Amino acid sequence: MQALTNRAKPVDRKPMTFVERLYLWNIAKGMMITFKHLFKKKATINYPEQTRPFSPVFRGLHVLNRDEQGRERCTACGLCAVACPAEAITMEAAERKQGEENLFREEKYAAKYEINMLRCIFCGLCEEACPKDAIYLSETFAPANYQRKGLIYGKPDLLIPHPIDNPEEYQQALGNRANKQQQEN
Ligand code: SF4
Ligand code: SF4
C-alpha cells in the first residue's frame, strides 16, 4: 500500500537484551532530565501565597456596584439578565420607599439579585448591558464549592462594601477599576 507521507517508521520488535531489561540506562536518562530541570527557572509558583498578575482584560467574579455615597446603583431593569447568554441572572424588583433614598439610588431597586456561577461563562455581557454601571466583573475568582447552592450568589455575596463605612474593603473590591477611575478624573 502506498503511504501518503514518509513519516511512518517500522516498529523494532527485537527481543530486549539482558542489559536492556535492567533498564539502568533508561533510569539514568530519566534522572538526567530531572537533574537538568533543577537549574531551570520554575514553571510553577507557590499559590496561594504567590499569585500571578492577571491580564488587564481578565473577567472574574461579579460585583454589584454602589455610588460614591454608598447607594446601590442597580435599578432592576433586567437588561443584564436579558443580555446574559447563559440565563444565569435572576432578580426581583421593588419600589424604593420614603426614607430609603440613602440606600438605593433609583426609585426601583433589586430586592433580590442572583447569579448562578455554575451557568456563568464570564463573558462580561451583563456589565456591557448595564446602563447604570451597577455590575462589573472583578479580578477575583469565584471560589470552589462542594454544594450547588453555594455557587448561587445572592446580593450579600455580590454587593461591594460600603465606600464610607468600609473604605479599605471598598477600594480593594474596586481593584483595577480604582486605577481606571483615577486616570479618568
Ligand atoms: S458574565 Fe456573561 S454569562 Fe456570566 S452572568 Fe454576565 S452575561 Fe451571564
Ligand atoms: S445590574 Fe444594571 S442592567 Fe442589571 S438590572 Fe441592575 S441596573 Fe439593570
Image: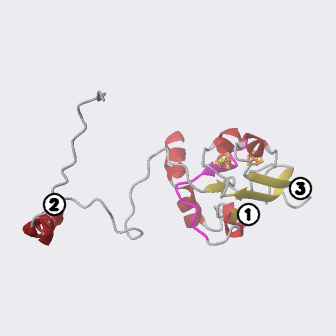
Q: Is label 2 in contact with label 3 (beta carbons under 8 Å)? A: no
Label 2, residues with CA under 10 Å away: few <14, some 14-19, many ≥20:
few
Query: Label 3 amino acid?
Result: Ala
- Foreground of the two, 63 or 98: 63
Q: What span is colored magenta in the figure?
A: 131-145
- What kind of secondary structure does the magenta stretch mostly adopt? loop
Q: Is mark 3 within 8 Å of ligand 2?
A: no
Q: Which callout, 3 or 1, points at the residue further toward the start of the chain?
A: 3
Q: Is residue 158 left or right of residue 94?
A: left
Q: Which residue is mark 1?
A: 154
Q: Position of residue 111 (x, y in %)?
A: 84, 59
Q: Which callout, 2 or 3, points at the residue further toward the start of the chain?
A: 2
C-alpha separation, residue under disc 2 versus residue under disc 1: 66 Å
Query: Label 2 amino acid?
Result: Pro
Q: Which callout, 2 or 1, points at the residue further toward the start of the chain?
A: 2
Q: Position of residue 166 (x, y in %)?
A: 62, 68
Give yes or no for residue 52 being in the magenta stretch: no
* Numbered tag placed on residue 94 in the rendering: 3
Where 33 falls versus 82 (above or below)?
below
Residue at the location (65% across, 44% down)? Answer: 127
Query: Label 1 amino acid?
Result: Gly
Q: Which residue is mark 2?
A: 15
Name which quarter of the figure residue 26 lies in.
bottom left
Q: Position of residue 158 (x, y in %)?
A: 68, 61
